Image (tube, rainbow, N blue to C red):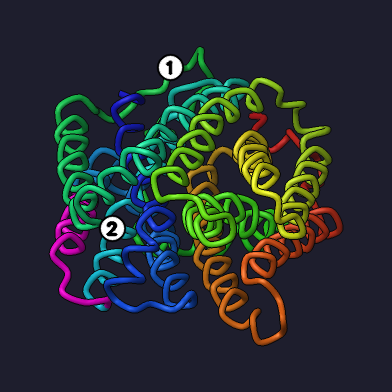
Amino acid sequence: MLLVLVSGFALSQAFRTITSIMATSLRAEFGLSAQALGVFAGAFAFAFGTMQLFMGIAIDLYGLRRTVLVVFPVAIAGAGLSALAPGYGWVLLGQMLIGVGCSPAFLVCTVFIARYFAPAKFAAVSGVAMGVGGLGMLFTGTPLAWMVQQSSWRTGFGVLAALATVAWVLIYWKVREPQALPAHGGIHPGDVPRESIAQAARGFGALFLLPHTVGIMLLALMTYASMLTLRGLWLGPMLIERHGFTLVASGHVATVMSLVSLFSPALFGRMDPGPQHRRRWLVGLTLLMGALFAAMGWSHVAWLNVAGALAVGVLSGYMVLQYADVRSAYPASMTGRAMSLFTMAMFLGVALMQWITGMAATTAPGWGWEPYTAVLLTIAGLLAAAAAAFRWLPGPSEPGDQNRP
């Protein structure tokens, strides 16, 4: 059942990383500026992120299976609309519909894992799920680049719509609500009293009464956003315009970056140092990620930029430790809400970072800067600020004790 749920997440991963390969064609057809391209890329993430609270409530009240079956067809409709879009406004609307439809895709996986697997296995199983779900990004590398070059970006949306339909059918056929086994220490859905929508909404507000929520969410805004902003938006244009790569050649780099990112979440999940040391790891690894972006920004050597992108793909796996941090920072009764709020922060961060970097790329020439230098240094600065906030704002008073009976 988890594998079938992950198939929906894989399609979500594909949809959120299409812009890097489609950017050149979209610019040519609709005459888009770098800022408009950033808005297009961020539309998915904004819609995805804003829906997370609603998806968390829906999962609590109606179950993960029913939630994903009702919402995911919106993504299929959005992909169909994008394939037929006569103008920029329509394809932008399609992106927002896709974001809404994909909004429960990974959240249902994390809730399923939290309910079905022991807490000690959460990071490792989540890492495997993230790695398998990352297969969706392989499609938006060389295969999508070849498809766009041979046909058009519209064909890519049509194929993704068909694959999303297959994923929906598999979920309908195979997935049932999980029943946690007491011996595994999972969270049984029946252990939490059924609430009204108003009570569930107030439950999200209770998360912000805990002082460590702010630092966790500020870090969440920037970490995943950094990797996805590079892989999903700027990698293709940077390699094509800065280094003269062809579309298919840039697709090869995107494919390899996606491939290495498949395995790193599982690796970091197995390396999880536990709640006593995990937060220090998160600060150090976030600063290291920022240093990689800064190095790519200053270096205009093609092989160093390619190596930097691949290093970002490898290092991005550490973000699975953030899920484990959320899992251990809140009581079991708040896990679903905390995960949905965390996921909301991650994707609103993607929308924010893609918009900010679009502005940076547009305004940089006026200040005498190369656009991609401005983009990459902006990402590095945002990561450093997030690491500082996470380090200096309050953390959980007793790490790891939140889930004890």
SS type, badge 2: helix
The x, y position of residue 280, in whole percent, is: 83, 40
Q: Going by the image, does 161 lie left or right of 5?
A: left
SS type, badge 1: loop
Q: Does any portion of residue 64 appear in the rendered image?
A: yes
Q: Going by the image, does 41 lie left or right of 154?
A: right
Q: Would you say the magenta stretch is mainly helix, strand or loop?
A: helix
The x, y position of residue 257, in whole percent, is: 54, 37
Q: Residue furthest top?
A: 183
The three-letter code of the residue at mark 1 reads: Leu
Q: Could you tell me which quadrant the C terminus lies in?
A: top right
Which of the two labelled residues, at mark 2 and mark 1, occupies the earlier sequence position?
2
Q: Residue furthest right?
A: 392
Q: Does residue 56 sit above or below 113 in this rendering?
A: below
Q: Nearer the viewer, residue 206 or 113?
A: 113
CA gap, disc 2 and disc 1: 35 Å
Q: Which residue is mark 1?
A: 181
Q: Which residue is mark 2?
A: 98
Which residue is depicted at the point 43% across and 61% down?
Answer: 45
The answer to if 79 sits in the magenta stretch is: yes
Circle 1 residues within 10 Å: few <14, some 14–19, many ≥20: some
Q: Does residue 162 sit above or below 52 in this rendering?
A: above
Which residue is depicted at the point 56% across and 38% down?
Answer: 332
Q: Residue furthest bottom?
A: 366
Q: Which residues are magenta?
A: 70-88
Q: Going by the image, does 257 lie left or right of 29?
A: right
How many numbered marks appear?
Answer: 2
Q: Does residue 187 sit above or below 183 in this rendering?
A: below
Which residue is depicted at the point 43% across and 73% down?
Answer: 39
The x, y position of residue 200, in whole percent, is: 42, 58
Quadrant in which residue 22 is drawn: bottom left
